[in-house]
């Protein structure tokens, strides 16, 4: 078949070249004939005109040129009558040539049509194989990239959890250290108070011993004086009776002064006892006030913790709402994308319909020309000479029309490609902008959370330092006031206060344990809610995937229908004239398929973004669970450590180590 086609092409080209040479020669002869009359001897007949067509034009031209001057006057009148017939024959020859060219082109286009169809089928199979291989490679690369991203994200989460646990352990250690220091200070205060009470008891024993020693010394002095007096009485009974009375009077006065002095000392001791009791009561009241303040601080700290948890839950809800809003935005983008895709497909269908209309018009013109050719086949033999002049003009017009047609087709293809590239670039830029905005928002949220956590830790540490300082200063001031006024009775009252505080602490611990159990139950309920939400999201994703599959099947059906319709139209109606147009339609279909494949890739990217958002939700939930577990563990550790710190002291047999 290929050899026959090449022979046909060469035969038509040689025929056209010979025909053009003959026309030029005849035109040159006609110019000469207008200027010179022709004699009767050399009048051209129809046979001579036909011989000119066969190849004897040059010899005839030479004969006419030699006898030109002789036959000019005789041929002038006859040539005018025959010149019109010559033009008619020329026109008929041109029409016959044109119709012969059309018939040859129809044969060539029919054969080239079958070849183009086979080549399109082979190219289509090769392209499908290449596309399947590229899709497999892309899926493998995407899976590897997703696995690497997940591994990196899990490593970051582990590092963040480890840092979080270290911070919580550090805070718990500081809290335990602060409580230990406070208990040690209380124990040291008890120890100092006990030492002061011992010093007071020693002073009291010294005063009693001094009083007893004075009393004994006075008694000894009195006995000595009595013995001397007895001796003096025995010696001077008579002369010293008056002196004896004076001595007795003086003794009575001394005894009364001694009793007054003892009474004064006892009153002073009772007054000092009352003052010490009063100071002790004030100290106990102040201690109760301090305890109330400490309890208020504990309540405030617990309220701060509750507020932090509430703010964390509020932030968590906000994050979930933001994620839902972003998901809605993505859904809207997908819908708008589908809407744009449908518009573009409709526009392409309209352009294809316009191209089909143009093709139909040209086919009809060709059929009409072919019918005219069949009608005029009988009259062409007589009118070949007349239509030779118009042949070149029609060839030029046909060539210009073909060039214009090709130019319009290239313009249409260029405009379609430009629109396609602009749409792809715009959609890619929108996708990149949204992705960048989403990642920027995530980074800002993480930085804000870190800053809030660091600021809260700093504020908490500063508050603890200020409270420590104030408490230490107050303790120092109270020590200096109470060291001189504490006594034995404070011991019993202080022990009662300690027992009361212990009972109170145990009751608070029980309430805290109940709260922790309630929090754990709430966490379980929240986990169930999160699982239900995850199930709903998965169902929605499945529905979206099913809708995507249905749309893909519809697209494939539409493509199959369009193929069948175009193929049936081309095969049934226009098998001889539409090889070029069918190849162009196949190219348009391939472009539309590529565009559909690009749209499907973008849909897959959007689905991957939805999956990434779901993974982030799960990761946030796991972080929340870890945070709650870590906040529960240190409280239990503190309970165990506080219970293990109580030991016995050597003095009071009570204390904290």
Image (cartoon, rainbow, N blue to C red):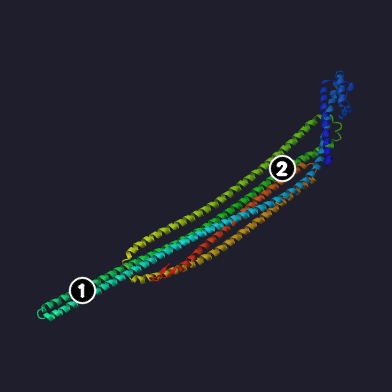
Residue at which label 1 appears: 258
Residue at the image position 14 percent from the left and 76 percent from the top: 247
Q: Quadrant of the N terminus?
A: top right
Secondary structure type for disc 1: helix
Q: Nearer the viewer, residue 22 or 456?
A: 456
In the rendered image, residue 329, in percent from the top left (x then y), is placed at 59, 52
Label 2 CA crowd tier, 10 Å (few <14, some 14–19, many 20+)? few
In the rendered image, residue 400, in percent from the top left (x then y), is placed at 75, 34
Residue 519 higher or lower than 413, as above or below = below
Residue at the image position 86 percent from the left and 23 percent from the top: 62
Left/right placement of residue 57 relative to residue 611 reads right
Secondary structure type for disc 2: helix
Q: Nearer the viewer, residue 646 or 19?
A: 646
In the rendered image, residue 24, in percent from the top left (x then y), is placed at 81, 27
| Disc number for residue 594 | none
Residue at which label 2 appears: 354
Instruction: State whether residue 540 appears in this view.
Output: yes
């Amino acid at each position: 078949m290929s050899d026959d086609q090449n022979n046909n092409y060469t035969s038509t080209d040689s025929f056209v070249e010979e025909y053009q040479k003959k026309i030029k020669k005849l035109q040159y002869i006609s110019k000469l004939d207008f200027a010179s009359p022709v004699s009767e001897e050399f009048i051209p007949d129809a046979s001579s005109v036909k011989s000119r067509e066969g190849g004897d034009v040059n010899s005839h031209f030479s004969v006419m040129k030699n006898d030109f001057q002789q036959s000019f006057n005789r041929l002038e009148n006859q040539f005018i009558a025959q010149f019109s017939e010559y033009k008619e024959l020329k026109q008929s020859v041109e029409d016959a040539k044109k119709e012969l060219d059309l018939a040859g082109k129809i044969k060539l286009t029919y054969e080239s049509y079958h070849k183009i169809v086979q080549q399109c089928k082979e190219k289509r199979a090769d392209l499908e194989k290449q596309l399947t291989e590229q899709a497999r490679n892309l899926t493998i690369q995407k899976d590897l990239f997703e696995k690497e991203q997940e591994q990196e994200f899990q490593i970051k989460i582990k590092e963040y959890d480890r840092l979080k646990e270290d911070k919580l352990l550090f805070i718990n250690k500081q809290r335990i250290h602060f409580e230990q220091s406070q208990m040690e200070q209380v124990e040291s205060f008890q120890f100092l108070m006990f030492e002061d009470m011992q010093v007071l008891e020693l002073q009291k024993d010294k005063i009693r011993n001094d009083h007893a020693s004075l009393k004994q010394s006075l008694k000894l002095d009195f006995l000595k004086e009595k013995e001397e007096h007895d001796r003096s009485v025995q010696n001077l009974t008579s002369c010293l009776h008056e002196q004896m009375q004076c001595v007795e009077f003086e003794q009575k006065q001394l005894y009364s002064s001694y009793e007054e002095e003892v009474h004064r000392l006892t009153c002073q001791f009772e007054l000092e006892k009352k003052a010490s009791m009063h100071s002790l009561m004030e100290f106990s009241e102040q201690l109760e006030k301090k305890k109330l303040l400490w309890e208020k601080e504990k309540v405030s700290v617990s309220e701060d913790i509750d507020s932090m948890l509430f703010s964390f839950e509020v932030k968590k809800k906000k994050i979930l709402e933001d994620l839902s809003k972003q998901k809605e935005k993505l859904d809207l983008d997908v819908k708008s994308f589908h809407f744009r895709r449908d518009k573009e497909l409709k526009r392409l269908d309209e352009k294809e319909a316009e191209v089909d209309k143009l093709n139909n018009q040209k086919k009809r013109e060709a059929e009409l020309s072919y019918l005219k050719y069949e009608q005029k086949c009988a009259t062409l033999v007589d009118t070949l000479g007349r239509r030779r002049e118009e042949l070149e003009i029609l060839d030029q017009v046909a060539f210009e029309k073909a060039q214009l047609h090709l130019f319009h087709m290239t313009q249409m293809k260029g405009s379609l490609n430009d629109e396609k590239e602009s749409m792809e670039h715009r959609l890619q830029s929108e996708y990149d902008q949204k992705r960048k905005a989403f990642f920027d928002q995530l980074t800002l949220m993480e930085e804000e959370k870190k800053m809030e956590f660091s600021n809260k830790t700093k504020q908490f540490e500063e508050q603890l330092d200020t409270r420590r300082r104030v408490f230490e200063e107050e303790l120092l001031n109270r020590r200096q006031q109470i060291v001189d006024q504490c006594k034995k009775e404070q011991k019993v009252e202080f022990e009662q206060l300690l027992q009361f505080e212990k009972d109170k602490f145990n009751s608070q611990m029980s309430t805290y344990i109940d709260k922790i159990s309630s929090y754990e139950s709430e966490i379980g309920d929240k986990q169930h809610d999160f699982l239900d939400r995850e199930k709903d999201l998965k169902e929605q994703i499945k529905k979206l995937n099913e809708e995507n599959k249905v749309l893909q099947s519809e697209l494939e059906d539409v493509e199959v229908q369009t193929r069948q319709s175009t193929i049936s139209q081309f095969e049934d109606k226009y098998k001889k004239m539409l090889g070029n147009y069918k190849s162009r339609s196949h190219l348009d279909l391939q472009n539309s398929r590529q565009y559909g494949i690009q749209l499907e890739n973008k849909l897959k990217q959007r689905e991957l973004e939805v999956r990434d958002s779901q993974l982030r939700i799960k990761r946030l939930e796991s972080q929340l669970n870890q945070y709650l577990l870590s906040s529960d563990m240190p409280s239990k550790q503190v309970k165990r450590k506080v219970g293990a710190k109580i030991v016995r002291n050597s003095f009071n047999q009570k204390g904290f180590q």
